[in-house]
Image: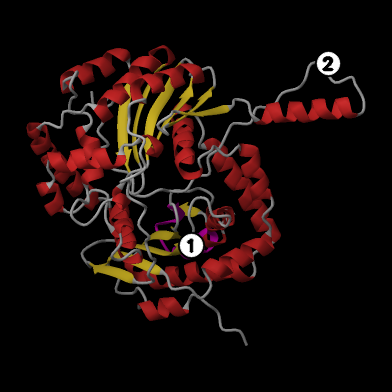
Amino acid sequence: MAAALAAGCLAARRLLWAWPGRRLVRGSAPAGRFIHLGTSRLRATKAATQIVLNVPETKVSSLENGLRVASEDSGLSTCTVGLWIDAGSRYENEKNNGTAHFLEHMAFKGTKKRSQLDLELEIENMGAHLNAYTSREQTVYYAKAFSKDLPRAVEILADIIQNSTLGEAEIERERGVILREMQEVETNLQEVVFDYLHATAYQNTTLGCTILGPTENIKSINRNDLVEYITTHYKGPRIVLAAAGGVSHDELLDLANYHFGNLPSAQEGMPTLPPCKFTGSEIRIRDDKMPLAHIAIAVEAVGWSHPDTIPLMVANTLIGNWDRSFGGGVNLSSKLAQITCHGNLCHSFQSFNTCYTDTGLWGLYMVCEPSTVQDMMHFVQREWIRLCTSVTESEVARAKNLLKTNMLLQLDGSTPICEDIGRQMLCYNRRIPIPELEARIEAIDAQSIREICTKYIYDKSPAIAAVGPIEQLPDYNRIRSGMYWLRA
């Protein structure tokens, strides 16, 4: 049952960047199709090119209440359909922090027409999967099912977000579940470090809060808090119904009108996104009993739709990631991976570019032996400065190819494509075609990487979060001085 129905066991606490997009299908025209010369042939060629770029097409429609419907029909026998809602922990405050995640759990505990058992049995008998997750800016409910069961899947999604009973007994039981989940999260040091990183980078703002919320909030959240959150945030203009796989857009649009047409459309009363100011600072939790140091360092980057996002993604790919289990070793393309492997400086590192609506974190997470922390930090900063000053065209060309490959590999199956559609519709109000993304990536060269990295990295104050045996981690002022080179 756990595989078929999960209540978002571990919330999506950070958004690891992935450039999504639309599939590109190539084909050849039948022989003799383009036989006319001059302007007719030119028009036909342009028309054919346009068709190729939009196969399979992502169709987008809107209901009268502002809810958007987006789908891609790839003709599969299965489909994924879900609701992407512009509501997450960033829209909470100090008193109700954790409500969005709590509500996600409650969505599976029964509705006015289905008990929890009925819901579980119906999903199980369909051979479907129902799941949900909460991030700092989005809440998502989605189902994966046979294409023939699309109407039932949409109806179930509509039922759980509009008719959940939110019973007092279920709320009390779920408190314990979430508190146990918080204990599990505390054992995942990467999650812990990234929560600390947000807390110090976005001090006294809602982006600095955790998604699960503090323990005292979990113990005090009541039914009125949950109902108020739904009433405030679950409105047509803030919701996208996305689907991928074997789906008919017209059928999906009809289902959306029937099941979601009565959602409120008024923008009045909907909270605006609070600004979150970045602060260069640090959090250190020293524990010499731990075997390894876990450290994240980041500078402020940009939001989803900023034009500098793609150059920063190429720069992120240039840094790359490495783990001791990798076989490439010193032959990997990442310069930092070569240095790390040769000097045995860490167990692993991972570059990241976490994007939000109007801000972001660009940085690196590393796991080190206590004795190598200082050297690893030195080489990380040295590599960052090299991106600002002397990165080469061949490195950038390789990184661009790798970024495009990763972008396509992440769109394997109806679920990641559906997630891609929903996220992009919330972030851009459209789905960016793969050819457009490829063109924007190809336009980047070494000079633009040096300029962008200088703009966001060089002589900037970073945010740092470190947990474990970190005695050898240089003090903040020394790390800050490593963010630039003195030129003679």
320 or 29: nearer the viewer: 29
Q: How many marks?
A: 2
Q: Please state the horizontal and vertical placement of residue 92, each as a whole percent of the image.
A: 26, 51
Q: Is residue 125 above or below residue 376?
A: above
- Residue 285 disc label: none
Question: Where is mark 1, residue-wise?
Answer: 340
Say what amino acid the circle numbered 1 marks: Thr
Q: Is residue 175 left or right of residue 389?
A: left
Q: Please state the horizontal and vertical placement of residue 230, each as a whole percent of the image.
A: 25, 38
Among numbered discs 2 and 1, the one appearing first in the sequence: 2
**Distance from Cα at disc 2 to Cα at disc 1:** 55 Å
* Residue farthest to the bottom, as pictured: 488
Which residue is painted at 12% across and 36% down in the image? Answer: 171
Which residue is painted at 63% across and 31% down in the image? Answer: 24
- In the rendered image, residue 145 lying in the magenta stretch gets the answer no
Any part of residue 10 in sight = no
Callout 2: few (<14), some (14-19), or many (20+) C-alpha neighbours within 10 Å? Answer: few
**Image quarter hosting the N terminus:** top left
Any part of residue 174 in sight = yes
Question: Where is mark 2, residue-wise?
Answer: 31
| Residue depth check, mark 2 versus mark 1: number of the one nearer the observer | 2
Say what amino acid the circle numbered 2 marks: Ala
Which residue is painted at 54% across and 50% down in the image? Answer: 328
Which residue is painted at 67% across and 53% down in the image? Answer: 397
Q: Please state the horizontal and vertical placement of residue 199, each as a whole percent of the image.
A: 30, 62
- The part of the chain drawn in magenta is 337-356
